[in-house]
């Protein structure tokens, strides 16, 4: 795989998909972006901007946009980036007709798929790469990209580091070159499960961080949350076969710190507003972007229970989100758990 001049398709024209399309286009590649919302496609095609998602960002005029999977299949991409929110990946890909799906996924020029969505699917409790495997051929290489990378900052060219995980080290090295430039740097990993778990569960902990801030707590409380939060993330990852050291890296503690403390974080915003006294349903109804952690809270907790993994912070976030538990009571219940060694 060359690292410039590639035909790349991005499935999902949200903030993250658009920011990565900008990076990849600036790196000398051809980009076609599929977006399910026809109004957004019209806006992007006419203006190469979407201030609802990336305020003040002008996308390169070379990027093309479509609302039809057929166009993606005809385009015959060499690389596909899946940036569809995790809870919509299955329904979006399942809506593709069989002829289009066969043409897209069995295109002989297609070398790899890179998933950038973060979450655990509701109901099935599958990680995103397992959901994608239901649709793509078993011999097609699948990778995931994660790390501390707010779309708003990436689109502005602020220095950002991520990690790409997969099995083939030669292709990983090529993908690092495809994504990397003077402001965007990609590291590699072979721990797909660990990278995906870190990206999914940190969104739940970020909701908790927002709740603490909304309640008016300070640095001591936040330090406690992040320290114990990464422990919970690591516990679940290890139970699923991940490597412990992954959670000390970009897709673990790096992504957790960024998402839990940044004003760009949608998940932190949801938590902050809850801490201020609003209901989750009201907050979500007013958002134009998806807060992946809300749905993942339920699926992560169910997965943890299935694997007999103790995740008390995740459980309290679930009770606040889904059973209207008072967030202050949730905090003090965590503080009053049985004492134990760290």
Image (tube, rainbow, N blue to C red):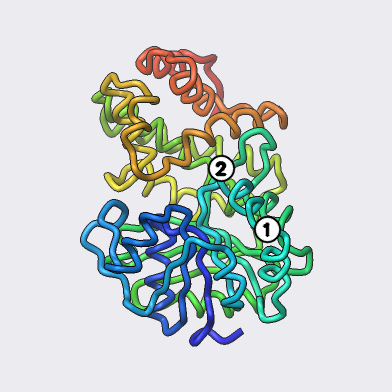
Q: Is residue 334 above or below residue 241?
A: above
Residue situated in front as seen by the camera: 68 or 34: 68
- Which residue is rendered at x = 46% and y = 82% of the image? 29
Classify mark 2: residues with Cα within 10 Å, few (<14), some (14-19) or many (20+): many
How many numbered marks does the figure carry?
2
Pinpoint residue 281: horizontal percent, then vertical percent: 39, 25
- Which residue is rendered at x = 26% and y = 23% of the image? 276
| Left or right position of 213 against 9 | left
| The furthest residue to the left | 56
- Which residue is rendered at x = 70% and y = 72% of the image? 168
Decide if residue 249 is in sight here: no
Pinpoint residue 308: horizontal percent, then vertical percent: 71, 27
Residue situated in front as seen by the camera: 101 or 336: 101
| Residue identifier under label 2 | 87
User: In the drawing, what numbered circle is on residue 107?
Assistant: none
| The furthest residue to the right | 138
Q: Earlier in the sequence, mark 1 or mark 2?
A: 2
Name the secondary structure under disc 1.
loop
User: In the drawing, what numbered circle is on residue 97?
Assistant: 1
- Which residue is rendered at x = 50% and y = 54% of the image? 251
Name the secondary structure under disc 2.
helix
* Tag 1 near tag 2, CB within 8 Å: no
Pinpoint residue 296: horizontal percent, then vertical percent: 54, 36
Estimate the spatial distance between the alpha carbons at disc 1 and disc 2, rounded to whole Å. 20 Å
């Amino acid at each position: 795989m060359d690292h410039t001049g590639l035909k790349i398709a991005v499935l999902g024209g949200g903030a993250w998909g658009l920011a990565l399309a900008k990076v990849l286009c600036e790196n000398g590649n051809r980009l076609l972006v599929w977006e399910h919302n026809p109004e957004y496609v019209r806006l992007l095609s006419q203006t190469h901007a979407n201030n609802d998602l990336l305020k003040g960002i002008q996308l390169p005029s070379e990027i093309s946009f479509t609302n039809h999977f057929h166009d993606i299949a005809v385009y015959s991409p060499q690389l596909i980036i899946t940036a569809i929110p995790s809870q919509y990946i299955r329904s979006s890909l399942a809506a593709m007709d069989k002829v289009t799906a066969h043409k897209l996924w069995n295109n002989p020029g297609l070398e790899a798929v890179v998933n950038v969505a973060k979450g655990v699917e509701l109901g099935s409790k599958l990680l995103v790469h397992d959901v994608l495997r239901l649709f793509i051929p078993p011999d097609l290489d699948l990778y995931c990209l994660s790390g501390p990378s707010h779309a708003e900052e990436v689109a502005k060219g602020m220095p950002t580091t991520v990690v790409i995980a997969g099995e083939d080290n030669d292709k990983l090295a090529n993908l690092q070159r495809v994504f990397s430039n003077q402001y965007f740097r990609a590291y590699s990993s072979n721990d797909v499960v660990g990278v995906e778990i870190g990206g999914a569960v940190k969104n739940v902990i970020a909701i908790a961080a927002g709740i603490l801030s909304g309640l008016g707590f300070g640095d001591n409380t936040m330090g406690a949350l992040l320290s114990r939060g990464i422990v919970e993330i690591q516990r679940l990852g290890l139970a699923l076969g991940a490597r412990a050291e992954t959670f000390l890296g970009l897709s673990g503690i790096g992504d957790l710190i960024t998402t839990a403390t940044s004003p760009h974080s949608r998940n932190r915003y949801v938590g902050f507003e809850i801490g201020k006294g609003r209901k989750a349903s009201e907050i979500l109804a007013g958002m134009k972007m998806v807060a992946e952690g809300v749905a993942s809270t339920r699926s992560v907790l169910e997965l943890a229970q299935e694997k007999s993994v103790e995740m008390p912070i995740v459980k309290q976030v679930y009770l606040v989100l889904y059973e209207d538990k008072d967030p202050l009571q949730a905090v003090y219940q965590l503080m009053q758990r049985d004492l134990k060694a760290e």
